[in-house]
Amino acid sequence: MPCERGRFAPSPSGPLHFGSLIAALGSFLAIRSRGGEWLVRIEDLDKPREAPGAAADILHTLERLGLFWDGPVLYQSRRSEHYEAALERLRDRLYPCVCSRRDIANAAVQGVEGPIYPGRCRRVSAPVNRPAALRVLTDDRPITFHDQFHGCYTQRLESEIGDFIVRRADGLFAYQLAVVVDDAAQGITQVVRGSDLLSSTPRQIYLQGLLNLPTLTYGHLPVAKDRQGHKLSKQTGAAALDLRQPAALLFQALIFLNQRPPWELSGMTPSAVLAWAIKHWNPARVPAPFGKRGFTKDNPKNITDADSG
Ligand code: GLU
């Protein structure tokens, strides 16, 4: 097994758009430039939100872009027994929760990711006759990691997020649980993805600790936004990539990632663009996701300026 592995883990809620291309390309270059493997995982846990044909379409798009992956594609929808086993291992730290979104919104303080769960069902046992979510008990020790694009990020789970859901009341396993189980199962060592997931990382590191799984290295890329400043996303109908000129798309993505590709590359093949980009990948040039490297008092994300410059 090579010493390093990265991955791209799209949810098949629609075709790839420019924002997901950034995550795909950034994770690909970050690991290939180190001689590592790049794996693909389809995060299709939430079947109701899946767009028919989207998984196949995403894989086809990656191939057209020359983003070829190593090994078999992993589908989360086929891995329930592994998530179940992880829940079993966490059992002593889980409790059922019947709070509705409205209950929480009424009682909670807003955090980086919406309401901080106030711990109601932690204190009062939930009635057994209602479908309950499972939450994991958190504590307030600071969890700090070094993000390869912007330095240190610290979060205290209990006071900034609250006990979080690992299995939903409708029985679906939560993203936070599945991602931790699967990153370990796939032998991933380096996660590079959009900065919308930056504040999820401490939850994932926390679960890795509870499950005795290795902690990975992380890097969060700036997310592409539409003209109104909203993150491009499949749910909000971001335009699918136009594959008539795949090399030009890669070229634009390299510009977004501030890799300064030479102009001639735009007319070449995807594999020529990628060969150049692997050779010249420079993580220090990737723009910091929140405008400038480092934590400012106006920046709600607790990022410190450990490696700017
Ligand atoms: N499935 C997530 C998404 O499509 C990405 C998860 C991850 O990279 O950890 O946004």
Image: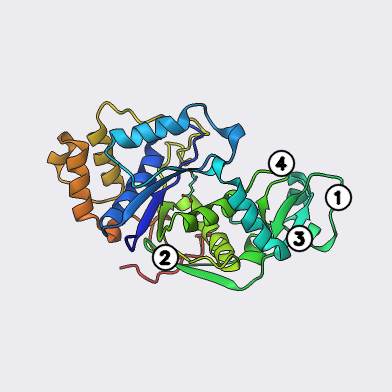
Q: Earlier in the sequence, mark 2 or mark 4?
A: 4
Q: 62 above or below 149?
A: above
Q: Is residue 75 visible?
A: yes
Q: Position of residue 127 (x, y in %)?
A: 87, 51
Q: Earlier in the sequence, mark 3 or mark 4?
A: 3
Which residue is found at the position 59% from the left and 65% from the top? 211
- Residue carrying label 2: 294
Around disc 2, counting alpha carbons within 10 Å, would you say few (fewer than 14), some (14 to 19), or many (20 or more)?
many
CB under 8 Å between discs 1 and 3 = no
Distance, label 2 to label 4, CA atoms, is 39 Å
Which residue is found at the position 37% from the left and 63% from the top? 148
Horizontal side, residue 6 vs residue 10: left or right = left
Distance, label 3 to label 2, CA atoms, is 31 Å
Which residue is found at the position 55% from the left and 32% from the top? 50
Q: Nearer the viewer, residue 232 or 47?
A: 47
Q: Amino acid at mark 2?
A: Gly
- Residue carrying label 1: 128
Around disc 1, counting alpha carbons within 10 Å, would you say few (fewer than 14), some (14 to 19), or many (20 or more)?
few
**Numbered label attached to residue 170:** 4
Instruction: Give the label, 3 or 2, closer to the camera.
Output: 3
Q: Earlier in the sequence, mark 2 or mark 1?
A: 1
**Secondary structure under the numbered disc 1 in the rendered image:** loop
Instruction: Give the label, 2 or 1, closer to the camera.
Output: 1
Residue at the limit of the structure toward the bottom, as seen here: 141
Q: Quadrant of the N terminus?
A: bottom left
Instruction: Give the label, 1 or 3, closer to the camera.
Output: 1
- Residue carrying label 3: 119
